[in-house]
Image (cartoon, rainbow, N blue to C red):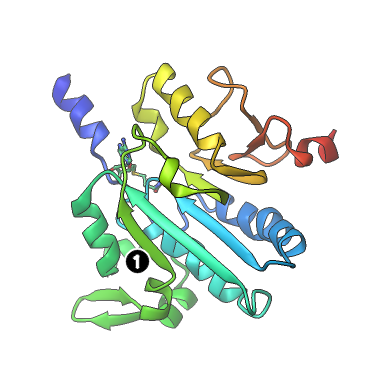
Amino acid sequence: MVKDIVEAMTTNETSFFRDQNPFDRLKEVVLPHMLKTRMNHRRMRTWCAAASSGQEPYSIAMILKEMETQFTGWRNEIIGTDLSDEILAKAREGLYTQFEVQRGLPIQLLMKYFTQEGDKWRINEPIRKMISYQPFNLLESMAAFGQFDIIFCRNVLIYFDEKTKADILNRMSKHLAPDGFLFLGGAETVIGITDVFKPMPGQRGLYVHENSPHLVKAA
Ligand SMILES: C[S@@+](CC[C@H](N)C(=O)[O-])C[C@H]1O[C@@H](n2cnc3c(N)ncnc32)[C@H](O)[C@@H]1O
């Protein structure tokens, strides 16, 4: 039992474009909103709060790269954090097995953004440089992070009890722009845990502030 819990707490299970739907929401809902509303200062900050071995932040970076003509002149910052130093070292290295690149990554993106090294694939430097990785425990103060426009916190809250989930979400809400977006994993929700975030109607896996302009628009 204890072994199972420890294993669950330390699982780094991830894949490129995991579950696909959140990345479609990012492309179709979130980024068009950012392009419209941040046009003046051309700055966007994204936090991947359980980055694991990097597949999630690199998926986001590839989407932004594919849209680079629309983001000309923007400063797009992506911060990838995780509890485990070891897994962050793998993320920084950006070197993946054939098995890892076969899970969820479209072949065109593999060909475009990776280089083969022996029997592995390394993500190219321009994509690697889009992300800055740093160790961070979600149970600690987020004060140093400032404000983000988009937060991915996927498939990590499942490991915490309800009180801890609420505490993390409540603190995280203070670091998300008023019209920002939060992505949670498919088995995660805010319902029954906290009122600071609400599900974005019709957009599975996507959450916004309780007073978000997106909810007023949708009502
Ligand atoms: C299952 S992976 C999810 C990776 C990615 N977000 C995804 O959805 O594919 C969970 C990650 O959460 C990290 N983690 C576990 N507890 C954490 C904590 N207290 N603070 C930050 N990261 C944590 C683990 O090290 C692991 O890499």
Among the 4 quarters of the image, the one containing residue 161: top left
Please indicate, yes or no, whether residue 14 appears anywhere in the rendered image.
Answer: no
Classify residue 127 by image quadrant. bottom left
Q: Which image quarter is the N terminus in?
A: top left
- Name the residue at the front extreme: 144
- Residue 184 drawn at (x, y percent): 51, 39
* In the foreground, 72 or 60: 72
For label 1, the crowd category at 10 Å Cα-Cα, with few meaning under 14, some 14 to 19 and many 20 or more, is: many
Who's the residue at 44% across and 30% down the image? Answer: 168
Q: Quadrant of the C terminus?
A: top right
- Total numbered labels placed on residues in the image: 1
Position of 60 compared to 71: left or right?
A: left
> Is 124 left or right of 184, judged from the image as shown?
left
Q: Residue at x 36, y 79 (%)?
A: 125
In this figure, which residue is indicated by the disc labeled 1? 101
Where does residue 186 sit, x and y in percent of width and height?
50, 37
Q: Quadrant of ligand 1?
A: top left
Q: Nearer the viewer, residue 80 or 28?
A: 80
Give the residue type that dot 1 points to: Val
Residue farthest left in this picture: 3
